[in-house]
Structure formats: C-alpha cells, structure tokens
Image: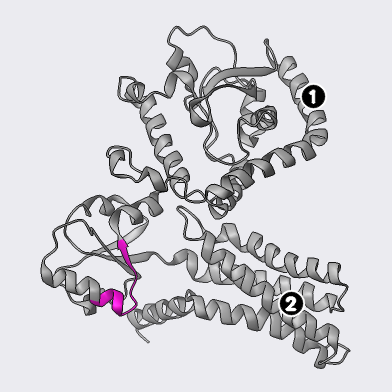
C-alpha cells in the first residue's frame, strides 16, 4: 500500500466517524442496546424483564436528548465538541433517571450506569480520533463582500471558479453574498444547491457564527428588531438569576469573608472595589468586585478603567482571584438588586461606554473595548438558553485554565 492510499484510507475513516448519523447510531448501539443485551448473556437476569426493558428505553431517550442538545449548542461560535459531550450526556441520562425516581417505575441500575459511561466514552473516542482533526471545508461564491471570510483561519475556504455543483464535492457547505448582484447562472447554481439539500450560508451570518462577533462598522445594517429574539426567556432568565442568587448566598458569604481577609492582608486598601458602570437600558449602576489591584493615582479616567496584560497594579492575591473569577463574587449583590445576570455581557465602565469615546484616541486599548462590544452584540442578537449553556461551559474552562483572565 502506498503512502498516499494509506492517507486516503484514514481520511475516509475519519469522514465516516464524523458523520452525525454514524455517531448517533453508534451511541444507540453502545449506550443503549449493548448494556441491555448483557442481562441475557454475561450478567444474570432475564433479557425481557420490565426493569431491563425500561432501562433500554431510558438509555435510548437519553441518547436522543443528548444528541439533540449537541446539535443545538454546537451551532454557536468557537464551540469545541469536547466542551458539550459530558454536559449533554449528563443532562440526557439525568432526565431519565429523575423520571424513574419520581414515578418509581422498575429499572436496571447497572444498565443505566453502564449506558451513561459507554455513551460518554463513545463520544470522546470519536472526538479524539476523528472530529478534532477535521477542518470544515466551505465553497465560496466569488462575488460581493465574501473576501473577509478568507481571513478566518478555522475553515478551509475553496474559491469557486464556475457555477458547477460538482466543484463543491468534499465541501461541507457553500457560502455566498445574497445581496450581491449575482450573474444568472450563479443564482441558478445556488437554487440548485439548495434543492439538492446542500447547506448554503449567507456570508455575514456565517462570519458571525465563526467569529462570535457582530461587526459594528455598519451597525445600521443589523435588524434591531431581531436583537432580542427570545424575549420571554429574558424575563425567565432574570427570575432564575435572582432565585439562584438567593439560594447560594448563605454558601457564598463565608467564602467572601475569607477572601476579604486575604485581600486586606495582602495589600493596603478596602476589600471591595466599586465602579460606576452602565447597565441594562443605559441605567447607571454601581458594580461590586473584590479589589485585585493596588490603588494608584492615574489622571486619565479611561486609562485607569482599563486593565492591560501583566498590569503592575495587580496584587499577588488579585492575580489568583482574577484567574479563578472569584473577584466577581460580590456581583451577587448586583444580581439580587436586579441589575445584572450571572451570564451575559458585563456592564462597561461609564468612561468607556460611549460610541464617541470608542472612536477617539487610545486606539490600542479602546480597540479591545470595541471588539468586546462586537461579542456583546452577538450575544444580544442570538440570545437564547443554548448560548447561555455554551457560555457556562466555556466559563468553567476559563476558571480551570485561566485563559482570558487579566
């Protein structure tokens, strides 16, 4: 066998393993059917007894729920499938276990536990062996404003030279600028692609999905009417935030007291840091955080509100608090005052929040604020429970690795 044919064989194998239908069928076989079949072969028991049958049905439902959750969450930007494997499986199997506990239906505990473990193992093996090594390949219709797409490195872009569906073989999708004045043959090509069941993206939405940002240079082109697509969830989320804050407050207060003592011993100054920020609907609020920096006189208010990489003002204790995100614990009082949410855009310092300030000097620092706003607008535009779930998963990663902290 030649080296080229060996590589081709590995690519075909990885291509099969990365297909959704194969993953789903394998999860059903490994996580549901196999644990159920053990009762009739390796383990004592009757194959068709009610407890075993109920466990089989439950494991099938758990696989379906977990698969649906992954499909919903993985459409969001920057998501790596490794982030959602365990949470989605826990949710699916947790729901069916809760059903048995509430209804007292008989069930096979070993089959349920084994189903969960094998399901998770199957998904991680697929991810390690195939999915993390596969880059998406997208065909680009070369008209309109598609050029910025080629600067996004996470995708293999294939610039099309002629409107032929055969030229998109091996591509996961097609992207085009629907607002461009396309030649008739290219419009016909896009229509044929859609009829053939191929995924066809609008270039702006695809760029937003890949970067997690809504560009602000032409904000007037965005539909403000759709920036809050799930308004009912907004009110439910606010209530959940408040209730959760009330429930964990007795647990958090002792930890906050210990942190406050550490801060006072580490450096001079108060334990809490208060800053005037702009909250929901433009209201001024006072945000509470643990102090992580030394008090230094800086004449420029905007300069003092920014934190740079390796900022000399950060204390030893403060660096640890920032890395673990413990410095934000006092914001629970802002949540109890209905001023903030556990998940979502953080209120910006008042001296940074104006559009005029963003377009003035201090470009190196304010440019980062501008980029932050792009991410915040993405959150507002695609606001949903699934995006909050993704943020929660990535926040856990940040707390464990320290990535993104200053």
Nearer the observer: mark 1 or 2; the answer is 2
> Which class describes the residues within 10 Å of circle 2: few (<14), some (14-19), or many (20+)?
many
Q: CA distance from mark 1 to mark 2?
A: 45 Å
Q: Is residue 173 shown left or right of residue 71? A: left
Quarter of the N terminus within the rendering: bottom left
> Which class describes the residues within 10 Å of circle 1: few (<14), some (14-19), or many (20+)?
few
Residue nearest the viewer, comparing 222 with 130 = 222
Identify the residue under disc 1. Answer: 257
> Magenta span has 194?
yes
| Secondary-structure class at tag 2 | helix
Residue nearest the viewer, comparing 52 with 402 = 52
Q: Which residue range is magenta in the image?
A: 192-201
- Colouring of the image: one colour
Task: Please tell me which residue is depicted at 82% across the width and 88% down the height of the picture.
Answer: 39
Identify the residue under disc 2. Answer: 58
Q: Earlier in the sequence, mark 1 or mark 2?
A: 2
* The label number, if any, that marks residue 307 in the structure image: none
> Magenta span has 255?
no
């Amino acid at each position: 066998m030649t080296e080229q044919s060996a590589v081709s064989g590995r690519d075909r194998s990885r291509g099969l393993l990365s297909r959704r239908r194969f993953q789903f069928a394998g999860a059903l076989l490994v996580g549901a059917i196999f644990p159920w079949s053990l009762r009739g072969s390796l383990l004592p028991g009757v194959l068709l007894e009610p407890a075993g049958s109920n466990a089989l049905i439950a494991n099938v439902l758990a696989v379906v729920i977990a698969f649906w959750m992954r499909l919903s969450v993985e459409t969001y930007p920057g998501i790596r499938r490794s982030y959602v494997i365990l949470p989605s499986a826990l949710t699916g199997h947790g729901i069916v276990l809760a059903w048995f506990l509430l209804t007292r239906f008989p069930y096979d505990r070993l089959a349920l536990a084994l189903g969960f473990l094998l399901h998770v193992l199957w998904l991680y093996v697929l991810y390690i062996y195939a999915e993390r090594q596969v880059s998406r390949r997208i065909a680009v219709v070369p008209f309109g404003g598609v050029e910025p797409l080629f600067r996004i490195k996470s995708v293999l872009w294939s610039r099309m030279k002629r409107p032929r569906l055969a030229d998109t073989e091996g591509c996961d999708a097609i992207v085009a600028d629907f607002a461009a004045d396309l030649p008739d043959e290219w419009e016909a090509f896009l229509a044929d692609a859609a009829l053939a069941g191929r995924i066809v993206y609008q270039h702006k939405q695809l760029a937003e999905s890949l970067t997690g940002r809504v560009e602000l240079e032409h904000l007037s082109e965005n539909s403000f009417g759709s920036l809050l697509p799930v308004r009912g969830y907004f009110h439910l989320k606010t209530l959940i935030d408040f209730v959760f804050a009330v429930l964990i407050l007795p647990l958090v207060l002792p930890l906050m007291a210990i942190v406050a003592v550490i801060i006072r011993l580490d450096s001079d100054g108060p334990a809490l840091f208060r800053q005037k920020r702009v909250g929901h609907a433009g209201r001024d609020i006072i945000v509470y955080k643990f102090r992580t920096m030394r008090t230094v006189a800086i004449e420029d208010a905007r300069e003092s509100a920014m934190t740079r990489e390796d900022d000399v003002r950060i204390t030893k204790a403060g660096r640890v608090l920032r890395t673990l995100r413990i410095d934000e614990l006092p914001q629970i009082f802002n949540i109890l005052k209905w001023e903030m949410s556990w998940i979502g855009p953080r209120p910006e310092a008042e001296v940074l929040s104006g559009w005029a300030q963003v377009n003035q000097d201090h470009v190196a620092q304010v440019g980062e604020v501008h980029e932050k706003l792009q991410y915040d607008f993405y959150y507002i535009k695609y606001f949903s429970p699934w995006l909050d779930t993704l943020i929660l998963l990535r926040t856990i990663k940040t707390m464990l690795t320290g990535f993104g902290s200053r």
